[in-house]
Amino acid sequence: MTLRELINSVDAEQYSESTLFLQLTKTKPEYGTNRHIQVTESDGNIIVSGVHVGSLGDILTYSIDVDPNLNVSKTHLMDAILKELSADGFTAPEQEGFWNDFDNLQKAKIIR
């Protein structure tokens, strides 16, 4: 399953206040990289790795590799990935500003 498929399979109403989730739903996937998001468990916590912000479009196409011994729901998985992507500490307006600037940068790169 890719991140895009996970986003499409969870209840969007539950994430209606997540700026990052809403941004991901509007982003067009960009195929070209073959990376993976790894999900494991450590001391009862879900650990997400392999997530970097190179491009939101790229991230949407990443396959999600969940440790087979980890019993996690799609909602918990989505929560953990959003937490890792958002750096857990920015306010909603700061996140929105960052993603708007990021989108403008991506558009500027395309125009060049």
Image (tube, rainbow, N blue to C red):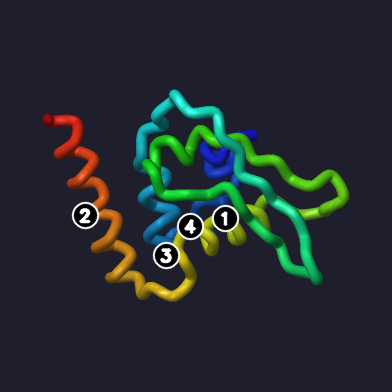
Work out whether mark 3 precedes mark 4 in sequence or the reverse, and give the earlier one. 3
Work out whether mark 2 precedes mark 1 in sequence or the reverse, and give the earlier one. 1
* Quarter of the rendering occupied by the C terminus: top left
Residue 55 badge? none
Picture residue at 26% right of the left edge, 51% below the top: 102
- Residue identifier under label 3: 17
- What separation in Å lies between label 3 and label 1 (alpha carbons)? 16 Å
- Residue identifier under label 2: 101
Image quadrant where residue 97 sits:
bottom left
Please provide percent x and percent y for residue 13: 50, 56
Q: Is residue 101 left or right of residue 81?
A: left
Please provide percent x and percent y for residue 11: 57, 51
Say whether marks 2 and 1 touch (CB < 8 Å).
no
- Residue identifier under label 1: 81
Residue 85 badge? 4
Picture residue at 61% right of the left edge, 44% below the top: 37
Say whether marks 1 and 4 touch (CB < 8 Å).
yes
Q: Is residue 38 left or right of residue 26?
A: right
- Count neighbours of disc 1 (C-alpha within 10 A) and say few if under 14, some if 14 to 19, many if 20 or more: many
Furthest-top residue in this view:
32
| Element type where label 1 sits in the image | helix
User: Foreground mark, 3 or 2?
Assistant: 2
| Element type where label 4 sits in the image | helix
Picture residue at 74% right of the left edge, 45% below the top: 66
Please provide percent x and percent y for residue 33: 48, 28
